[in-house]
Image: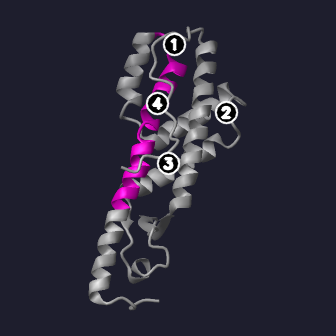
Amino acid sequence: MTGLLTPQQRTERLLQLIGLATSVRGVVLSNTVELEPKIGELLALAFCPEPEPRRLLHTLMLGSWLGFERKVELLGALLDVEYPGVVSPDFKARLKSINRLRNAAAHYEVDASDDALEHHNPLRIQLLGYSNGKIRPVEITDSVLAALQRDMDLVIDDLEKLVTQVRARRCLPPSEPSRFPLPHSRGLRRD
C-alpha cells in the first residue's frame, strides 16, 4: 500500500497527521493529568491520617518522587491488603490501561511511515515507542478515546468510593478539606 501518494499529497497528509497527533495527545494528557496527584493525595490520606505528616508525605514522596506507575502499584497493593472489594474488580486494569495510553501520548513518536500516511482512516494516529529493543505501536482512534472517557469515569467513581472508605476507617470527618472529588471526564475536552 506504500507509494500511492504524490510528494505534495504526502506533505499535506503529514501535516494533517501531525496536527491530529497534537490534538489527540492534548486530549489524552489534559484528561489524565489530574489522576496522578489525586492518587498521591489518596495514598497520603490512607497512610497518614494526621494532616501535617500527611502533607509531608504527599509533598516529599508522593508529589513528584514516585511516578504515576509506582503510585498505581502502591494503590493496588493498598487495595489488596486494606480495602478489598471497595472498588470494581477491573479498577486496577483500567488504571493500567489509562497509564499505558497516557505514557504513549507523552513519550511515543508519531508514525509517519507511508503506511500510516496512506491509512484508510484519516482520523487515526499510530504512536511508536520502544521497549526491550522492540517497537511498541499504539493506535489511537475515536473508539480508543471513547474507551478512555469510559475508563476515566469509572476510575473516578471508584476513587471517590475509596476516599469515603479511607476517611471512615481513619475516623476522618467527611468535611475535612480535600481536593476530591475529581471532575468527571464526560465529554473529553478536545481543545
Q: CA distance from mark 4 to mark 3?
A: 14 Å
Name which residue type carries label 4.
Lys
**Which residues are drawn in magenta?**
21-50
> Which residue is denoted by mark 2 in the rendering?
87
Q: CA distance from mark 1 to mark 3?
A: 28 Å
What main secondary structure does the magenta stretch of the protein show? helix
Name which residue type carries label 2.
Val
User: Looking at the image, is 33 positioned above or below residue 121?
Assistant: above
Q: Position of residue 76 (x, y in %)?
A: 60, 36
Residue visible at 64% across and 31% down in the picture: 79
> Which residue is denoted by mark 3 in the rendering?
99
Reply yes or no: does residue 29 show up in magenta.
yes
Q: Position of residue 25 (x, y in %)?
A: 38, 55
Q: Give the label on residue 49, or none.
A: 1
Q: Position of residue 175 (x, y in %)?
A: 52, 9
Q: Is residue 146 left or right of residue 12?
A: right
